[in-house]
């Protein structure tokens, strides 16, 4: 949500872990094909959150470094890796500005891919793209992945009703699409090309079915420090229920867009 501080610790990290969409196997296949990833490759998942992409990607390569700025996000990711028996992930507290340090640690030309899944809108993309290029091996590169339009900006009756409620509750107009809009996608393509990458795009589309708990949890996962206090959440959920009227199930068309830059 635009204008909100990037603060996803505490309960917000828990909601992010429970309710954010994962990535279909077709997305991991597309990444593996784009960079010719093998069991000998190391990849970096920048802005990894609680590991939604990190863990399935780890099953395709030798090792993944998951990087995020929020310790609570990384703690959920570590637990998820243990639960899923994925041992080949290292978790690092850091941000996009730490790519030069990773270059010093790993060496230039050492990484098969850097993935940024639903996180680039928090970063300085132009500086990041330039910093990543020497880190990637020949044929490797960087992939920007956006995982569907925010729940409150979709073209369905329930989404429009949700947006009306959230705008009233927050006291602001919600227009920011978290990098999923065409203007942002074009900027990513142009930025990768300017940094010297060969650029192409691909996408994976699927339909998700949500119940009210998942809808509310998805909203909480995006609110960061603005999440209601625990004592206020039942009332907040009831207000969402009233806003979306009689819907018990919500069909969401999810468009996973990949902007890929290769060396």
Image (cartoon, rainbow, N blue to C red):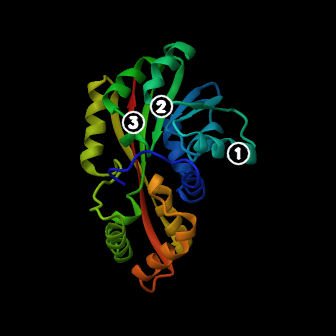
Task: Mark 3: give few (<14), some (14-19) or many (20+) Cα within 10 Å.
Answer: many
Residue 102 falls left or right of residue 40: left
Residue 102 falls left or right of residue 83: left
Q: Position of residue 209 (x, y in %)?
A: 52, 70
Residue 251 falls left or right of residue 87: left
Q: Nearer the viewer, mark 3 or mark 2?
A: 2
Q: State which tag comes first along the sequence, 3 or 2.
A: 2
Depicted 137 relative to depicted 258: above or below: above
What is the spatial separation of the Cα atoms under label 1 and label 2, in whole angstroms? Answer: 21 Å
Q: Position of residue 130 (x, y in %)?
A: 35, 22
257, 45: nearer the viewer: 45
Task: Mark yes or no: residue 237 visible.
Answer: yes
232, 30: nearer the viewer: 232
224, 59: nearer the viewer: 224
x 30%, y 54%: residue: 176
Residue linked to disc 2: 95
Secondary structure category for the residue under label 1: helix
Mark 1–mark 2 contact, CB under 8 Å?
A: no
Residue linked to disc 3: 260
What is the spatial separation of the Cα atoms under label 3 and label 2, in whole angstroms? Answer: 20 Å
Quadrant assignment for the C terminus: top left
Residue linked to disc 1: 79
x 36%, y 42%: residue: 121
x 28%, y 29%: residue: 193
């Amino acid at each position: 949500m635009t204008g909100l501080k990037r603060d996803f610790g505490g309960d917000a990290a828990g909601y992010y872990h429970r309710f954010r969409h994962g990535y279909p196997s077709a997305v991991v296949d597309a990444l593996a094909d784009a960079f010719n990833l093998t069991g000998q490759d190391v990849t970096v998942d920048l802005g990894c959150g609680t590991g939604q992409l990190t863990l399935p990607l780890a099953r395709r390569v030798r090792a993944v470094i998951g990087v995020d700025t929020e310790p609570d996000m990384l703690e959920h990711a570590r637990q998820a890796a243990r639960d899923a028996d994925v041992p080949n992930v290292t978790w690092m507290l850091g941000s996009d500005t730490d790519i030069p340090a990773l270059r010093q640690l790993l060496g230039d030309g050492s990484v098969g891919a850097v993935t940024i899944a639903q996180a680039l809108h928090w970063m300085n993309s132009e500086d990041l793209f330039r910093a990543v290029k020497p880190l990637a091996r020949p044929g490797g590169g960087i992939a920007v992945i956006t995982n569907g339009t925010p729940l409150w900006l979709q073209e369905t009756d329930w989404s429009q009703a949700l947006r009306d409620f959230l705008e009233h509750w927050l006291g602001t107009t919600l227009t920011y699409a978290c990098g999923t809009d065409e203007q942002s996608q074009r900027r990513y393509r142009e930025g990768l090309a300017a940094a010297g990458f060969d650029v192409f795009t691909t996408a994976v589309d699927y339909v998700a079915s949500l119940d009210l708990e998942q809808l509310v949890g998805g909203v909480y996962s995006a609110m960061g420090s603005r999440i209601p206090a625990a004592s206020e959440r039942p009332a907040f959920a009831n207000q969402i229920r009233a806003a979306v009227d009689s819907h018990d199930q919500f069909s969401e068309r999810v468009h996973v867009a990949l902007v890929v830059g290769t060396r």
